[in-house]
Image (spheres, rainbow, N blue to C red):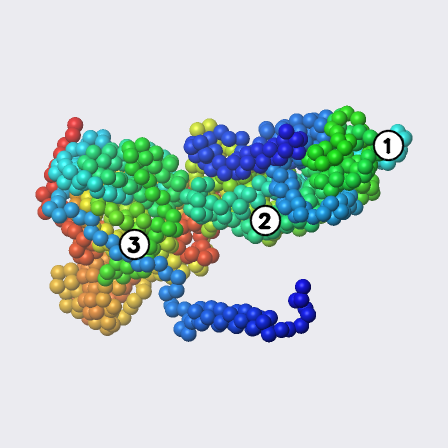
Amino acid sequence: MRIATARRISQAFFLALFLWFCLVATVGERLWKLRGWPVNWFLELDPLTGLTSLLASGSLYAGLIWGAAVLALTLVVGRFFCGWVCPFGAMHQFVGWLGARSKPLKERVQRNAPHPAQQIKYFLLAFFLGAAMSDLAARLALGQVAASLAGALTLGVVLLATRKGQGGRAYALAVGLVLAVWVAWSLLAPSGGAWLLAGLLDPIPLVTRSVNLVLLPLADAPARVAWPEPRFYQGAGLIAAVFLAALLLNLWRPRFFCRFVCPTGALLGLVGRHAIWRVGKTQARCGACLSCDGACSGAARPAGRLRPAECVLCMNCLDTCPEDAITYATQPSAGGEAAPDLSRRRVLAGLGLGLAAPPILSLSGVLGPAWNPALIRPPGALPESEFLRRCLRCGQCMRVCPTGVLQPAGPSFGLEALWTPVLNNTIGTSGCQPRCTACSHVCPSAAIRPITLDEKLGRGQYAAQGPIRLGSAFLDRGRCLPWAMDRPCIVCQENCPVSPKAIFTRVAWETVLGGLIAGPAKGNELAVSGKALKPAALASGDYYLQSGGARARIAANGAHSLGLTPGVGWRVPAPGEPLSVAVRLQRPYVDPARCTGCGICQHECPVSGKRAIRVSAENATRERSHSLLLKGAGPG
Amino acid sequence: MSRDTGMNRRRFLMRAGKAGLGMAATLALGWWAHDTQGPSANIGQAQAVKLPSFAVKGTEKRLAVVKSSHRVPALRAGLEAMGGIGAFVGAGHKVVIKVNAAFATPPALGATSNPELVAELVRLCLKAGAAKVVVTDNPINDPASCFELSGIGPAARAAGAEVVLPHPGEFRPYTLAGGRLIRDWPLMYGPLAGADRLIGLAPVKDHHRSQASVCMKNWYGLLGGRRNVFHQDINGIISELGRMVSPSLVIADGVASLAHNGPTGGSLEDLRPTDTMILGTDQVAVDSMAVGLLGLKPAQVPWLGLAAQAGAGTTDYESLNPTKVELG
């Protein structure tokens, strides 16, 4: 078998496996449901998710250690992940092939010529690494040596990659300089936190998010395999635009995203460019037919001085060379090798911008006084400052959520929160179901830490600390039917799943009709005058006739007669006595001490647009500083 | 080629012919799509449906009450007292069982129909010759989660029933003749299409707004859309539901009643053992009897009176001479 065919089979296999994992991330026990499929495996393999998460949070959570394995193997064999495993890469490869297949060799060689813009990805890599380790001061102060060392190591790698001369002194000087800047930064920089912004362009989170929130809902609407009802994801258009742009640009330059944008590719390129095995020519002089350049996926110029950092191991050059002059071996290319086309200044600029991004974005006060109460995070979500260090924006939580209440945060939530999970209780089939912890267990980076049902509901060993609250419901009395419109309702109270209910009612009587005058009575029938009544309009069981401080429920009514169900203390009014009609209202109140912020009340509220009862993030358990009630105070 | 070397007669006629065809096609398409009226007010509405009566001739006014602390024996004894399942389900029938699967809570909390009871009813229907048994509801919480967590879905499937979840395709607009509230409203008609029998199976539950939720309130789960607006007139809507559905049989499961914090419950402490199962063909009578398990008299519950007034049944259940069965 030809080596490129083996590569295509590998790509097809891993793409199919990836799509399968996206499909089966449905809560359930069937073979095609979640049961035990490693649905996060591709996210975990991506070394950039692991590295940025490590830098930002100080730990490498669970399966993210797979990224270390990929990095380690890349040191030996080069960018195998890009060429053979990455499902996004497979998509690019395919679309790129579609765009190039009928082009003459000359044009293909032109499209595959190394382009200065290829260094953008290194810049992006530096930026994302910078943003992930922005608060070294806090790290140092906390003595988290491991994380600091990892940061230094990364800087070293970046430096190593960018050093031009081989002189050890220049290298030492550069390391010293950067360390000095780093320490100065640690001491002087305002601590704006460290943010895992990489997920915006990190390839596996990007493709996972796009498949989960765009492709799957489209494909599943008629098929109904993943979800029994159609799914909605807010702002799917923006997610799709990024995804489709990345795919379609392959028609202009094959593997556009991989060559120019992919920060993971940049990382693997830097790590793998000194790999033990690499692609290269066996002889310096060849027929110069440029077939290899015309087939090169990574724009690595195999015919000339090869750029190992750009080589994605597609192996097309091996297959196309008519002289068999290209091989994958331990020798460097006989045609010579070139370092990646990037300047130290640009990389440092990227790093600096990255370091500055969290403090700059923090100036808007999102982690402080201007925190957004609409940002309701799922149960188990870490405090916001910690959450932003870990969330990959992969959309796995939104995919697995059985009710579809978890939505990707749109641009209005700020760049730092873009595409992170937020509850929108008006979308989906229900609010956050009390007896579900699916998102916390699927989250690959523990931005939503794994919780048990006991912890969520505040049972067993968690009884003392109470349930996890996502926020609290607040009534909008100007929109609520019993509060503003004299109409009975209390759907919110009925659906509150907490026992005892967090929504309670108080009875209020509102006089809705006056000016009636009692006529003669016959049993429970009473004739009335003064006004003509709309027949049967007062017979719903909620209206009462008032007379002298007592009330009788109206069971039936004609234009001038009432059928009454007398209550305690009722006496038949004397003819001529003035009467009025009152509606009995049960008005809802929220007890924030019991409310978990599940949002079921909001979902069910019959005020269908902007609901009359809405959850906001005040009193959420995860942010102590947002708590609402004093412990131990009050009657309850 | 001579494409650009001037015009001869043949080429001109060819081009004129093509242009003529193009013109004719364009104008024809325009004419075909032309609309002089504009859209009517009820644009985009699906075909309305009617709901037949599922009542079985000759079984009118049957009522049975079983005292027991075990559901499955109570169901068997109750059906026996009603004349046997064979009186209601025959060979080749499509039977729909409307359960209460409203909430995604475990069966022990009693907010939903008991799964063992559902399974037993499914088995009895199949044993009586039913060709197909469908178990359905349009729950309040996430439908798939409701059916799974309540245990109804797995139990019904294991017993041989088909479980139908709500989906936009299952709903059709429906208007209750003479109705005030249920007018042009989405009804979960899909599972009911072609059905021969409809059985309601509901737990007895406390309900703050309507005081009690039993068999008639259970038909709420056949409505779609933003049905919660009907809570403004809860008594009106329950009595209309009682008129909308003429069931073959209803079963009120009060072996344990959700006495507090209904209709959601949420704690075992909300349940009270009431050791009663009520079966009947007059749903007003069944519900009138069932509210007694919650300590209510029919006269205190306005929707019972309204439903009786509307001719859906009688609140005076003793007048039906209920068969009373005591199981140890």
Name the residue at 31% across, 39% down: B162
Residue A529's tag is none
Residue A128 drawn at (x, y percent): 70, 41
Q: Which residue is mark 3?
A: B234
Percent position of residue B194, x then y: 25, 48
Q: Residues within 10 Å of mark 1 (few under 14, many from 20)?
A: some
How far apart marks 1 and 2 lie (CA) works out to 42 Å
SS under mark 3: helix
The residue nearer to you, when weighing B26 against B310, is B26
Local crowd size for mark 3, using a 10 Å CA cut-off: few (<14), some (14–19), many (≥20): many
In the rendered image, the vertical position of residue A237 relative to residue A276, given as above or below: below
| Label 2 crowd (10 A; few <14 / some 14-19 / many >=20) | many
Residue at which label 1 appears: A171
Q: Quadrant of residue A61?
A: top right
Whether discs 1 and 3 lie on one chain: the answer is no
Say left or right for A17 vs A107.
left
According to the image, label 2 marks what residue? A239
Residue in front for this viewpoint, B271 or B172: B172
Q: CA distance from mark 2 to mark 3?
A: 43 Å
